[in-house]
Amino acid sequence: MPPRKKPSKDTRDANQEAHFALVLEAAQLVVKLLRNNGFSCATFGSLASKMYGSARCPKDVDMLVLQDPPKEGQEEKLKTAHEIKTLLLDKDPRHFYLTLPRDPQAEYRILWYRQEYRGPECKVDILVPGTMHLPRLAHTSITWIDGVPLVPFSLLLLHKLQGWDDHRLAEEPHKQRKQGQDAADLRRLAALTQYAEPLEKLKPWNDEELFSEEFQELTKRRVKDYCQEFPTRAPWWRSLGFDVGEIPDPPPPKEKKARTKTKAKPAANEPGNAVAGVHPEEAVETPRTGETGKE
């Protein structure tokens, strides 16, 4: 069987643009349905990163759904993530459907959005406060971009760090493979100076409305671990007010072999002489030394 031809860059870019449009469409519909049923919400994860300005195309929607706690004397309970998924399915069965997870014994179901039957689709993750240390956000802390509510940039940053840490410590290979993408996402977020630079002054890491005490302690350890893995990132995290620990010195650059100059270019038809006049091993460029981990 002949090898599969790789798509061109233009084709890949067009596919990514189409998928981003799909994910954005899904998020906007979820927001609309939730608000129509009395919920507020905020996006985090890769879609929020993209909306803030990161380059990577998001694969799915991560939505934090917020509910007002029941008033005293009311019997109504807060809805679970599964109940909210079922609500979305009931309100729009044309565009939403549920599937089983990898573990068929698991109690939860995976929610998907599709434009049409058997058409393009993307996953929609619904989470409630308390899951993965996600907070109960105040409405005033939510940022809106292109009709999509976003968690605060500081919360997005530290939860991306949490994702990197969870994936590198995971036992499942498919989760471990995601840590490089998480590290690259962190680098991209740090480059968004419009949102990153104010954090150097604000240093909101002790804000208990955003970060629980346990999450704050976990973040301190995660920052040190990340900076051990990527030492050149340490100055930026230090500028945010974090203790980055003892950072190892970068390895010394490898010395390049000096090329010997030839006085005269040998004739191409002389036996035993290379046309270029340089030994093949001396023509190889020495790789640049860099960080120990991959982003």
Image (cartoon, rainbow, N blue to C red):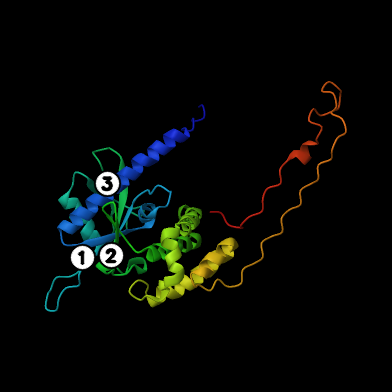
**Is residue 65 found left or right of 219 in the rendered image?**
left
The amino acid at mark 2 is Val
In the image, 192 versus 184, the foreground residue is 192
Return the x and y of residue 199 as percentages of the image width and height: 43, 67
Residue contact between numbered discs 3 and 2, judged by CB atoms under 8 Å: no
Mark 3 surroundings within 10 Å by alpha-carbon count, few (fewer than 14), some (14 through 19), many (20 or more): some
Asked if residue 37 can be seen in this view, the reply is yes
The amino acid at mark 1 is Lys
Marks 3 and 1, Cα distance to the nearest angstrom?
A: 24 Å
Return the x and y of residue 236 as percentages of the image width and height: 53, 65
Helix, strand, or loop for circle 3?
Answer: helix
Helix, strand, or loop for circle 2?
Answer: loop
In the image, 168 versus 100, the foreground residue is 168
The amino acid at mark 3 is Glu
Residue appearing at x 49%, y 54% in the figure: 184
Residue appearing at x 42%, y 38% in the figure: 13
Marks 3 and 2, Cα distance to the nearest angstrom?
A: 21 Å
Residue appearing at x 87%, y 30% in the figure: 264
Image position of 95 with respect to 131: above or below: above
Residue under label 3, please give it.
Answer: 25
Return the x and y of residue 16 as percentages of the image width and height: 39, 41
Residue contact between numbered discs 3 and 1, judged by CB atoms under 8 Å: no
Question: Of marks 3 and 2, which one's residue comes earlier in the chain?
Answer: 3
Question: Of marks 3 and 1, which one's residue comes earlier in the chain?
Answer: 3
Residue under label 2, please give it.
Answer: 128
Residue under label 1, please give it.
Answer: 79
Residue contact between numbered discs 2 and 1, judged by CB atoms under 8 Å: yes
Image position of 27 with respect to 143: above or below: above
Helix, strand, or loop for circle 1?
Answer: loop
Marks 2 and 1, Cα distance to the nearest angstrom?
A: 9 Å
